[in-house]
Image (cartoon, grey):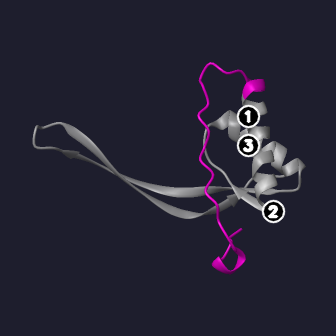
Amino acid sequence: MYLSESNIVEIEDVPFPNIPPDWDKDDVADLADEVLTKIQIANDASFIVINGEMNFVFSFVSFAIRRGIRCFTATTERISEDKKNKDGETVKESIVKFVRLREYLNE
């Protein structure tokens, strides 16, 4: 599914939270629910585009879908090339191109 510019009224970028690596699934789920609630209070969002730490995204998308909010991920194409710098070290150069939005399964 594609969303055209005519479908998008306003986009708000919400910074992705820092998720400590020692948190368990319940800590992550609680944070996902808290962030989603803040987004819902501040906006009348009918869809959300989300990428990030996998456990957080899973919890966030699960909660959002239960609340009737459609969730999408941005898909990209990564073009990488290895090059030698002036010191002879191999450096990877990458270009990341946005391709489309892909909707999360909502079943």
For the residue carrying disc 2, how many other residues have a C-alpha within 10 Å: few (<14), some (14-19), or many (20+)?
A: few
What's the CA distance linking mark 2 and mark 1?
Answer: 20 Å
Query: Element type at marker 3?
Result: helix
Residue 71 colored in magenta in the image: no
The reply to whether callout 2 and callout 3 are in contact (CB within 8 Å) is no
Picture residue at 67% right of the left edge, 70% below the top: 10
Picture residue at 84% right of the left edge, 52% below the top: 106
Q: Which residue is mark 1?
A: 31
- In-image side of 24 versus 90 (left or right): right
Up-down relation of residue 36 to residue 53 (above or below): below
The reply to whether callout 3 and callout 1 are in contact (CB within 8 Å) is yes
Nearer the observer, 65 or 39: 39
Picture residue at 48% right of the left edge, 57% below the top: 77
Q: Amino acid at mark 1?
A: Leu
Nearer the observer, 56 or 92: 56
Q: Looking at the image, is mark 2 or mark 1 earlier in the sequence?
A: 1
Query: Element type at marker 2?
Result: loop
Residue 107 seen in the current view: no
Q: Which mark is residue 44?
A: 2
Q: Which residues are magenta?
A: 1-27
Instruction: Count up the numbered dots.
Output: 3
Nearer the observer, 64 or 96: 64
Q: Position of residue 14 (x, y in %)?
A: 63, 51
Q: Which residue is mark 3?
A: 35
Q: Position of residue 67 (x, y in %)?
A: 89, 51
- In-image side of 61 versus 73 (left or right): right
Q: Position of residue 92 (x, y in %)?
A: 30, 44
Which of the 4 image quadrants contains residue 5? bottom right
What's the CA distance linking mark 2 and mark 3?
Answer: 14 Å
Query: Element type at marker 1?
Result: helix
